[in-house]
Image (tube, rainbow, N blue to C red):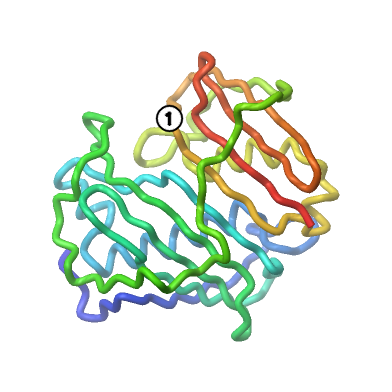
Amino acid sequence: MPISPNFTSILSKDWEINFTQCAPNGYLKYTDLCNILQLTAAAHSEIGGISFLDMQEFNQAWVLSRMRVEITKLPKWGDILTVKTWINSLENSRSVRALEMHVNGEKIVGSETFWAVFNTKTRRPEGLALPFAHFELYPEKKATQEGFSKINFNHEKEIVFEKIVFLSDLDIVNHVNNVKYLEWCLDLVDEKLILNQRIKSFEMNFLKELSLKDEVIIHENISDNETIFSITKEDKTSFALQLNWK
């Protein structure tokens, strides 16, 4: 698609929270929070001419590599969210995108995301084939207090679950969707911590692809106010999640 005449380098998009997106406490699920952030990023890419459909002409797609989310509080059923997004950096095969979630003018969530251009045929990263110079970059405009980092999962950990990847876990790029990893891990967390909104931040590292019928093991390490999950296939780590509690 061509660049939209309504294109702006900072996008604001409103979303209404419906009941299908809420946990039993009536507040937005953490997985749906990530979905809304990703959909907002996709909407910005679409009006900027670098969407999934645009990139598929060159067998390319954006895939998430790292993501940090900082949460003051969660929105609830019926709330109208305003999500703002802009790009901190964009060069060759990599991009850092910032996102903020606001309710009634109050910022409640900030996120920093790291994306890579991925060839969906060769399954390898490569340079973006589309023009992007029309995006103004905001390297100093941060959405989070801390940036994303490399999660340290090389410590003692316990095997807590074994799983096979099903068709319902896959996305349009034909690998496990980033939100699915989060869902698998949160299903293993004490539900009281989630229902009482004890998560103040979480960070995800996406390291290797997982595909249909892959057999994986989920590991957990718990310390003071922090839980680290890692997901491995044949002893190689595909994903890591760090949860910080309050």
Towards the viewer: 174 or 218: 218
Question: Residue drawn 54% across and 65% down?
Answer: 144
Question: What residue is disc 1 on?
Answer: 208
Q: How far from the left and from the top, in percent, is residue 117?
A: 27, 45
Extreme top residue here? 234
Quadrant in the picture for residue 79: bottom right
Q: Nearer the viewer, residue 174 or 10?
A: 10
Q: Is residue 240 above or below residue 211?
A: below
Crowding near the residue tagged with mark 1, few <14, some 14–19, many ≥20 C-alpha atoms within 10 Å: some
Q: Nearer the viewer, residue 245 or 169?
A: 245
Left/right placement of residue 238 relative to residue 90 reads right
Q: What amino acid type should be assigned to the residue bearing mark 1? A: Lys
Determine the image quadrant of residue 6.
bottom left
54 lies above or below 161: below
At x 73%, y 63%, the residue is: 27
Asked if 172 appears above or below 214 in the picture, the reply is below
Residue 54 shown left or right of residue 237 in the figure: left
Expressed as whole percent of the image width and height from the top left, the position of residue 99 reads 47, 67
Which is more toward the observer, 62 or 96? 96
Q: Is residue 70 left or right of residue 118?
A: right
User: In which quarter of the view is residue 87 placed?
Assistant: bottom left
Q: Residue 111, how many percent across, how many down?
A: 52, 62
Question: Who's the residue at 71% across and 30% down the image?
Answer: 220
Q: Quadrant of the C terminus?
A: bottom right
- Which residue is drawn at the image coordinates 48% and 59% (left, top)? 112
The kind of secondary structure element at disc 1 is loop
User: Compared with residue 2, is residue 185 higher up or lower down, i.e. above or below?
Assistant: above
Residue 25 position in % (x across, y down): 80, 60
